[in-house]
Image (tube, rainbow, N blue to C red):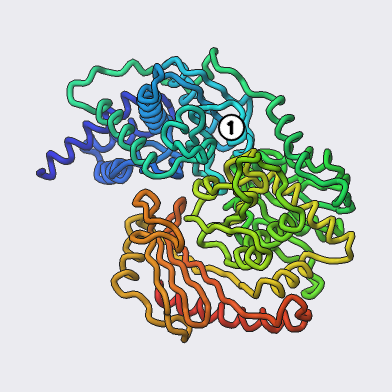
Amino acid sequence: MPETASADQLLTTVHRWIELDPDPTTREQLTELLARAESAAAGADDARQSLEQLFAGRLAFGTAGLRAELGPGPLRMNRLVVRQTAAGLLRHASRELVAAGGDGSGRIVIGYDARHQSDAFAAETARLFADAGWEVHLFDRPGPTPLLARQVLVRSADVGVMVTASHNPPQDNGYKVYLGGRLSQHLEPHGRGAGAQITAPIDRAIAATIDEVVAEDFAAGSPAPAVEPAPSPAFPATAEMIGDDARTAYRERALELLDPTEHPHRDLTIIYTAMHGVGGELVTDLLSAAGFERVVPVSAQFDPDPDFPTADFPNPEEPGALDLGLQAAAEHEADLLLANDPDADRLSAALFDPAQQAWRQLTGDEMGALLGAHLLDRGPLRAGGEEDPEPVMASSVVSSRQLSALCRARGVGHESTLTGFKWLARVAGMSFGYEEAIGFNVDPTSVKDKDGVSAALIFAELVATLKAQGRTVFDALDAIAAEAGIFVTGQVTVRVEDLAQLGEITAGLRATPPTAIAGSPVVESLDLARAPLPGATFDEAKTTDALIHLTEAGDRVIVRPSGTEPKVKCYLEAVADTPGADASTQQVAAARARAAERLEALREDMGRLLG
């Protein structure tokens, strides 16, 4: 196509987008750019270039739904993108319900966090489904992701939508999709996906239907849309509002997990930060109801605030994110610092380490091992039915192998899955699951997703039990290491400007795979885009862009693009044996030091290879 024709096509597309856009703010932004681009005045080329960047593609809908920066155009999160996404989701779900023998209508549950425009995106979705005759259940105010996931199960909803960008920067928002009810039973007859986020190939089918909607919107000769821009869309009058009853029921269900007979101890001073998110009210109420009387919120981060004024990147794992919490922990001589991310599906913890005489934030793998060991000692927190298989524990492939080794030592089953709770939630008989990015599920029968709220409760129980025994979590980590072996983990991260570069990095490693890492020969390589995880059957729908390398020294390196951010992650794990379960503290420390040295060697080698 000649350059002039391409330019004309761009301007035509922008004109049509403005006609369709229900948001006066993004309409105005595009209208101003378009007027400058069509003028002969200075700055026209810059305006045209800005439009080209905004319309250079469309946000890709996948298993993680959508997540991107707020703004105008198809590559940003805005009300028109959400309208078209919701319309495609509605059309796909209705078709499948008809195929399942129904009339095409169903039930949807919608939740949203406190980010900019989350309520507007929820309202756009609710209106579309309500207009189509669906039964719409909508939260009455912002809340945690685990609450939404729980209600998808409780209400036997066919579709669940959570509007959140989790721990992304303030300028971002996102859109997550869950399936349940009749729709889930139709698409996944095994039943294990009910209440969980979508997986492939369902995401591709929804994406194709969204494309249908977009094509119809922009088809030549299509009628002018009857769009009346409004600053804030209203919730549909027919929606059933989900209020405090759901929050109370969640709290009561979580409190059932506790064992006040064998684990009655509550003598803790806990500092808690909600990271400007939506977990504060529910978590502090839950801890108080459980008997933890000394819970001190970080007041500057307690109330929801979409601008995240004290955390540019509101992820508890980011350097500096816990500074206010650590300061409060020192001031109050606390026993434990707990932190949720903004939508409260993740949990982080920090404690005072006597060996270092300083507060130390635990890694996700350390927390996974501690929770796993605690639950192995206690047994499953929620009894299954007689038809349920033997309980197993699970962790994602990029998580440490320590939990698997501990399960093996205890004679308990363990399963490794692809990355993401969408896969962990589908493990048959799972009693506990985690992934290294501080995601934990201590109650898989109640919530089919990571849940930083109930995990906070059980982690507090764990720490209180150890304190009553005169032990610390660091003592517990040494005991786990003595029993299961030393596993030390770390990461190398490569950020990219262009998302296309993500695949280029892994493609380069496929073309020229490493033969040795940190001086140790690579003895096994696995490409998850072409092969299944060990012990699994190959399924094209379960492939992912990830490469695993195992060395003769027992170390492991995994390289994969992030599913939510423009970066490639390299997960490193170094190992060392201990003399056995009766190994002394000094022997464990020496073995950990050896593994730490190897971890640094892995980090340097992979940094050079990926850099």
Q: Residue at x 60, y 54 (%)?
A: 434
- Give the residue type that dot 1 points to: Leu
Q: Residue at x 62, y 80 (%)?
A: 576
Q: Residue at x 42, y 31 (%)?
A: 186
The image shows residue 100, relative to residue 404, as above or below, that is above
| Nearer-the-camera pick, 601 or 552 | 552
Is there any visible trace of residue 305 in the rendered image? Answer: no
The image shows residue 413, relative to residue 595, as above or below, that is above
| Residue 205 in which image quadrant | top left
Quarter the C terminus occupies: bottom left
Is there any visible trace of residue 468 in the rendered image? Answer: yes
In the displayed orientation, state which residue is furthest to the bottom: 519
- In the image, 442: left or right of 184? right
Horizontal and vertical percent position of residue 123 = 51, 24
In the displayed orientation, state which residue is furthest to the left: 2
How many marks do you count on the picture? 1
Horizontal and vertical percent position of residue 302 = 72, 42
Q: What secondary structure is marked by label 1?
A: helix
Horizontal and vertical percent position of residue 2 = 10, 44
Q: Which residue is mark 1?
A: 153
In the displayed orientation, state which residue is furthest to the front: 386
Horizontal and vertical percent position of residue 28 = 38, 29
| Nearer-the-camera pick, 113 or 211 | 211
The image shows residue 402, relative to residue 346, as above or below, that is below
Pointer 1 local density, CA inside 10 Å: few below 14, some 14–19, many at least 20:
many
Q: Residue at x 40, y 43 (%)?
A: 62
Quarter the N terminus occupies: top left
